[in-house]
């Protein structure tokens, strides 16, 4: 297994004018139109890698998003998508079959837990590095993915500029985090260390600070509403506060609400 290093990821610009976010582009027009606009010539589907390219398995449950991401990666120098997966069973099958350098995995895949698949694949196919791609920018999600064995975490809003970089970095065994997530993760780790909060408690705290109701937090974190209320009660006790407003002030002071 390749040795892992940590790479600083601050300061990557998002060039909206030149290449708008994938989720907006796929909603606004076809992949064919996007390719014409960018004047890209993606490699034929199913072609084999014979030139030392970084081989990638791409997993997302939305077909249009997969086509857009494949276009993006296949047009990047030195990267080749060797297969696609639309659910977690296909992810496991394709990773075992192709032994790619990198798996790009959507965090919200159906029919199971992407986090559990990451853990399993790290043990079974240790030479394949894993980049998580998601709309979720909560630092707890990133920490869970890293703890499971991923070494890349990219937000879909910034995939256009960041995903090729993340694939190249992780193929070298270097950690890559979207700068937006890296900043929040630093704040989360500081809160956990200073106040003896769990990662999940810190995620709940951040969402409370952002104004979400218990029902909304439960939906975002895939928890029951009762469990969220239990976390809220623990936060009051651990932080020595009595009101939601005090929780919000605390989260703001810790930098958990910064963009």
Image (cartoon, helix red, strand yellow):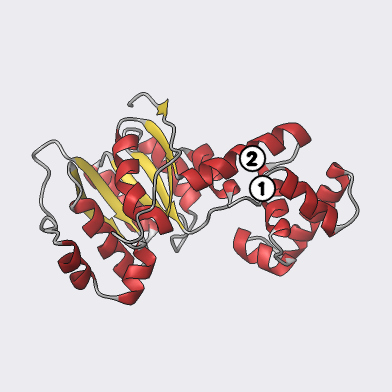
For mark 2, give the secondary structure: helix
Judge whether residue 34 can be spotted in this image. yes
Quarter of the image for residue 83 reads: bottom left
Q: How many marks?
A: 2
Judge whether residue 151 can be spotted in this image. no
For mark 1, give the secondary structure: loop
Name which residue lies at 33% across and 26% down: 2
Name which residue lies at 33% across and 76% down: 28
**Place of residue 109 in the rendered image (x, y in percent of width and height, measured from the top left):** 43, 60
Pointer 2: residues within 10 angstroms few (<14), some, or many (20+)? many
Q: Which mark is residue 256?
A: 1
Name which residue lies at 25% across and 64% down: 67
Residue 224, compared with residue 196, is above or below; it is below
Judging depth in this view, the residue of 254 and 52 nearest the camera is: 254
Residue 193, compared with residue 49, is above or below; it is above
Quarter of the image for residue 5 reads: top left
**Place of residue 44 in the rendered image (x, y in percent of width and height, measured from the top left):** 10, 58
2 and 1 marks in contact (CB < 8 Å):
yes
Report how far apart the C-alphas of labels 2 and 1 lie in the structure: 6 Å
User: Quarter of the image containing the N terminus?
Assistant: top left
Name which residue lies at 32% across and 57% down: 90
Which residue corresponds to mark 2? Answer: 187
**Place of residue 161 in the rendered image (x, y in percent of width and height, measured from the top left):** 33, 50
């Amino acid at each position: 297994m390749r040795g892992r290093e940590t790479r600083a990821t601050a300061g990557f610009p998002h060039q909206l004018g030149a290449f708008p976010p994938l989720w907006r582009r796929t909603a606004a027009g076809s992949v064919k139109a996007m390719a014409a606009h960018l004047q890209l010539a993606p490699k034929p589907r199913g072609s084999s890698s014979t030139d030392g390219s970084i081989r990638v398995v791409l997993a997302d449950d939305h077909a249009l998003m997969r086509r857009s991401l494949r276009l993006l990666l296949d047009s990047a120098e030195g990267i080749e998508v060797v297969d696609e997966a639309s659910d977690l069973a296909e992810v496991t099958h394709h990773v075992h079959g192709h032994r790619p350098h990198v798996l790009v995995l959507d965090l919200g895949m159906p029919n199971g837990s992407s986090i559990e698949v990451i853990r399993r694949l790290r043990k079974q196919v240790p030479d394949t590095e894993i980049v998580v791609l998601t709309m979720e920018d909560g630092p707890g999600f990133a920490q869970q993915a890293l703890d499971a064995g991923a070494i890349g975490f990219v937000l879909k809003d910034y995939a256009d500029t960041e995903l090729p970089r993340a694939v190249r970095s992780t193929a070298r065994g270097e950690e890559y985090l979207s700068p937006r997530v890296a900043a929040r993760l630093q704040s989360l780790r500081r809160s956990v260390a200073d106040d003896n909060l769990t990662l999940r408690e810190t995620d709940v705290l951040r969402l409370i600070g952002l104004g979400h109701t218990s029902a909304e937090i439960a939906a975002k974190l895939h928890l029951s509403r009762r469990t969220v209320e239990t976390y809220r009660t623990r936060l009051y006790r651990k932080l020595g506060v009595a009101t939601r407003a005090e929780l919000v002030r605390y989260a703001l002071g810790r930098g958990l609400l910064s963009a």
